[in-house]
Image: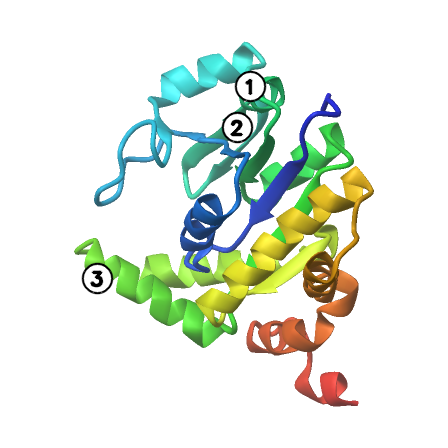
Amino acid sequence: MQGSQGILFIISAPSGSGKSTLVSELWSLVPNLEFSISYTTRAPRGSEQDGREYHFVTREKFESMIAAHEFLEHAEVFGNYYGTACHSLAGADAQGKDLLLDIDVQGAAQVRGKVPDAVSILVLPPNKETLGKRLRNRSRAEGLVSEDVIERRLAEARKEIENFRQYGYILVNDVLDQAVEELSAIVLSEREKRDADCDGPEMRKLMELADSCRQSNAMERLRPVLISFGLLDSEAANA
């Protein structure tokens, strides 16, 4: 399904992990990267605009697109549909650009089934407490704080984090500048590997930074996250 022109990057994260900020920073730093704008049936938040953060459509419109097989992936989350249109991938390839998909764990699994060589990246909060604070701060900014909704999102985050083994790279978004540097290194090093041109000290440094974020090398940073969400026993982790 994917041509040889571009790389498909999948980025997933629990709600409130700072993924949107990371993606925005990446967009400003890395050229030739197309960002896929998802379709959703949820209402816009704050200053969000149709066609910028999302394509906001009715449930009827979304379901007609499902019936017409227009989605590369789609899922229902918290009562709203989210989906990536197939034309996003074709459009990026036609322009010779790499495509970044900002999608949840369900959608990522669907895409990997169709595009096996996609590069998948999971962004995580440093711990459950920090994620709870971020979610509450965002809710206050939107003028509505519901502990029931926050607890539901924390429970959903736990389910998403359980799927970390499905991802090639893990980023823990604790210090924003560091996470941006790591995300940029992953994208640039994947490009260089496919171009078979990894020479030079700067590129070797990027490759090393990206390699440190590989799932197989990220357990030391991942361990506190898993413990805080009750996915790893602290005594077993220290054994």
The residue shown at (36%, 66%) is 134
Residue identifier under label 3: 140
- Against 114, residue 226 (above or below) is below
Left or right placement of residue 81 versus residue 95 in this view: left
Element carrying mark 1: helix
Q: As drawn, is 55 to the left or to the right of 195? A: left
Instruction: Determine the image quadrant of residue 88.
Output: top right
Alpha-carbon span between mark 3 and mark 1: 38 Å
State the residue lying farthest toward the left.
143
Above or below residue 24? Residue 87 is above
At label 2, the amino acid type is Thr
- Dividing the picture into quarters, in which one does residue 196 lie? top right
Q: Quadrant of the N terminus?
A: top right
According to the image, label 1 marks what residue? 91
Q: Which secondary structure lies at badge 2?
A: strand
In the image, which is nearer the foreground, mark 3 or mark 1?
1
Q: How is the image coloured?
A: rainbow
Q: What's under tag 3, amino acid-wise? A: Arg
Residue 229 x, y percent position in the rendering: 56, 72
Q: Earlier in the sequence, mark 2 or mark 3?
A: 2
Q: Does the rendering let one see residue 159?
A: no
According to the image, label 2 marks what residue? 84
Nearest to the observer: residue 205 or residue 84: 205
Q: Which mark lies nearer to you, 2 or 1?
A: 1
The kind of residue on which mark 1 rests is Gly
| Mark 1 nearby-residue class (10 Å; few <14, some 14–19, many ≥20) | some
Looking at marks 2 and 1 on the same chain, the residue that comes earlier in the sequence is marked by 2
Residue 219: % across, % down: 72, 72
